[in-house]
Amino acid sequence: MKELKSFLGGRWVAGGGTPHTLLNPATEEPLARTTAGAADLGAALAFARDVGGPALRALSFAERGALLKSIAGALQSSRDELLELAIANGGNTRSDAKFDVDGAIGTLLAYSEIGNTLGSKRFLVDGEGLQLGRSARFHGQHIAVPRRGVAVHINAFNFPAWGFAEKAAVALLAGMPVLSKPATSSAMVAHRIIEILHEAKVLPEGALSLLVGSAGELVSLLGAQDVLAFTGSGETGARIRSTPNVIAHSVRVNVEADSLNAAVLGPEVEPRSDMYELFLKDVVRDMTQKAGQKCTAIRRVLVPRELSSSVKGDLVELLSAVKVGNPAEEDVRMGPLATAGQLADVRQGVGRLNGRIAFGSLSGPFEKGFFSSPILVEEPGDAVHEHEVFGPVASLLPYEKDPGEIVARGNGGLVCSIYAEDQAFVEKLVLEVAPLHGRLFLGHPKIELSPGPGTVLPQLVHGGPGRAGGGEELGGPRGLAFYLQRVALEGSRPVIQKLIG
Ligand code: NAP
């Protein structure tokens, strides 16, 4: 069985904490084990700060962008191997695995391009300079410089490749060294990625570290120049945010947590119309892709009351055609949940929703493996607006007049999708729900190859207020701000202009 070590202080070391066995969630076969041992996290952070940081800051944005291109190239060369690992350790179908691995490569390339555009500078000039007083000589200019600490990235289990890349791409481009901690249960993909990058020697020493296994004391070792980007449950996010050290040193924290994403079908949409079919397709894709283990997946399906029985019948028919099974088999469309714990949470969560099961079953289809069928719930209780069931589960919610009021009950989310032809309806709903979300997806059948609301694109921001964690990632160059310190320069205009070039 493969032993997964951490890559800290420029070498492979036994990780901290209790050893943990990683399984194939379809067969329950043990695949790898995280190692236990005394990883010196303080020394690892110091190495990243003192060796990786200066090496990255010495490079221009374009040069850092070139590093990202090399990372993407190295991952592309090992793509098939990574896909196989995601199938085995993540319970991903091949298509789910591509979503993760290709998403990682695409995001790295997108940020490499941004680096190219930012060119030979090593810091950002933020906005136009300003005359500050009556004298034209008294001048102000904002700039943004890389922070001098480490960017610590703690990721959720569901996207081990993309989760690593979407955070690392932005931090490295900004000029900060990265210490990445994948979720333990699905760490094989992230671990292999770091091995590949180490073997390919694409990054300066100290620029990228990996912690496998539990985070241990990592968060309490962070200082004022470090930043922490976390993706996972709201509960862990809250614990991290309230770590005394994080509060005492004002450690910059970004939390990407859970979300009760809603999809709203407009009142005038005709059954069988292209808009209606697109809506059904997106709901089914979000329920079944990655077995519904996507933070952006549709959880609440809002339909006009008069269409609810038609939508229910059509969803049941489409879900019946989804073959659940071992994703190593080609015709399987939905694999298992990632762990036994996830499966137990999903079953308990469906109970908490307290509705009627319109499709699916709480008992697993196979003796081995952490499988659930897709589950469509109708007439759920209020918990549907409070509790995220992180699996292939969505609830049907008929509305009379005001879907916006129902959407708002989710208390902030990552994405809300709207499928409507009536422009006035779209405009009203957009303005009503926009303050509650990081992204709104306006579905339209004329958009070719629409990825649906569940796909996060590097050009647009990802995150959301309230329950979603209050964070923001990606968004093209906007994402760099988290890793940069904005500073206002005020002084003599020629001095400042010379400095910024
Ligand atoms: P989780 O249990 O909160 O774990 C997330 C990460 O935090 C893992 O790497 C975990 O490590 C680590 N962790 C746990 N306790 C910690 C602590 N005290 N200090 C530091 N790190 C700690 O979440 P999950 O089960 O992996 O992920 C599922 C949740 O993530 C869902 O609620 C989903 O909605 C959310 N999610 C959100 C997004 C987004 O972008 N908004 C994306 C994906 C998932 P171990 O694995 O070693 O315990």
Image: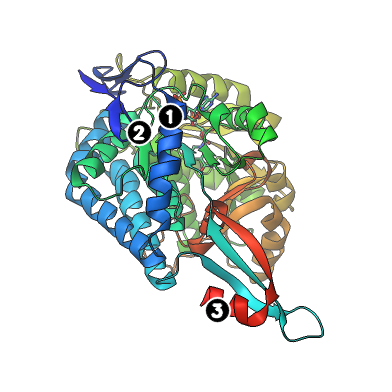
How much space separates mark 1 and mark 2, taking CA atoms?
A: 7 Å
The yes-or-no answer for disc 1 within 8 Å of ligand 1 is no
Q: Secondary structure at mark 1?
A: helix
Q: Is the C-beta separation of discs 2 and 3 under 8 Å? A: no
Q: Residue at x 58, y 67 (%)?
A: 421
Picture quarter containing residue 170? Answer: bottom left
State yes or no: Cβ of the residue under disc 2 lies below 8 Å from any atom of ligand 1: no
**Marks 1/3: CA distance?**
38 Å
Q: Is residue 318 visible?
A: no
Q: Which mark is residue 314?
A: none
Residue 224, image x, y percentages? 61, 41
- The image quadrant that residue 324 belongs to is top left
Q: Are marks 1 and 2 in contact (CB under 8 Å)?
A: yes
Vertical position of residue 454 compared to residue 329: above or below: below
Name the residue that disc number 2 marks: 9
Label 2 is placed on what type of residue?
A: Gly
Tell me, yes or no, if residue 344 can be seen here.
yes
Task: Say whether disc 2 or disc 3 marks the residue closer to the N-terminus.
Answer: 2
Q: With 445 as the anchor, is 499 left or right in this view?
A: right
Query: Considering only order in the chain, which callout, 3 or 1, is on the residue closer to the N terminus?
Result: 1
Disc 2 or disc 3, which is closer to the eye?
A: 3
Q: If the image is split into quadrants, where does the N terminus sit?
A: top left
> Does residue 490 appear left or right of residue 486 in this picture?
right
Q: Please state which of residues 228 and 93 is positioned toward the viewer in this rendering.
A: 228
- Figure check: 481 above or below 230: below
The circle on residue 498 is 3
Query: Left or right: where does residue 326 sit relative to residue 106?
Result: left
Which residue is rendered at x = 72% and y = 41% of the image? 409
Q: Is residue 410 above or below residue 483?
A: above
Check mark 3 vs ligand 1: CB closer than 8 Å? yes or no: no
In this figure, which residue is indicated by the disc labeled 1?
A: 43
Disc 2 versus disc 3: distance between alpha carbons? 38 Å
